[in-house]
Amino acid sequence: MAVADVYEALRSDRPYKKKFSLAESLQIMRMGRGTQFDPTVLDALLAHVEEVEGILFFHRDEESYYAVAA
């Protein structure tokens, strides 16, 4: 769960920070490999990062809608 949570947080704008680029996000996560993140789970994310990016892209307008509606 931590891998998905941190990845989404890094790749999303927040009121207190802009999102990190894909390269920056992956570098940060690789630095936590074996300490903050289970290597097997992180490797699974890295193997499917293009698919994950597609999901985030597809749902970006939905996130904006809910942020404004709240």
Image (cartoon, rainbow, N blue to C red):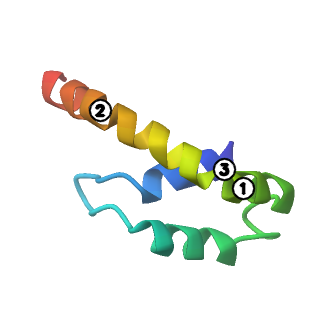
Q: In this picture, is 38 found above or below 69? A: below
Kindly indicate the quadrant of the structure image that contains residue 34: bottom right
Quick one: SS at disc 3? loop
Name the disc covering residue 23, or none.
none
Label 3, label 1: how far apart the Cα atoms are:
4 Å
**Quadrant of the rendering where the C terminus is positioned:** top left
Callout in the foreground (2, 1): 1
Residue 38 position within the rendered picture, expressed as x and y whole percent measured from the top left: 82, 58
In the rendered image, which residue does mark 1 sit on? 47
Q: Amino acid at mark 1?
A: Ala
Label 2, label 3: how far apart the Cα atoms are:
22 Å
Residue 25 position within the rendered picture, expressed as x and y whole percent measured from the top left: 50, 68
Quick one: SS at disc 1? helix
Residue 42 position within the rendered picture, expressed as x and y whole percent measured from the top left: 74, 58
Label 2, label 1: how far apart the Cα atoms are:
25 Å
Name the disc covering residue 48, or none.
3
In the rendered image, which residue does mark 2 sit on? 63
Q: Amino acid at mark 2?
A: Glu
Q: Residue furthest left?
A: 68
Q: Mark 3 near mark 1, Cβ–Cβ under 8 Å?
A: yes
Position of 7 with respect to 66 (left or right) is: right
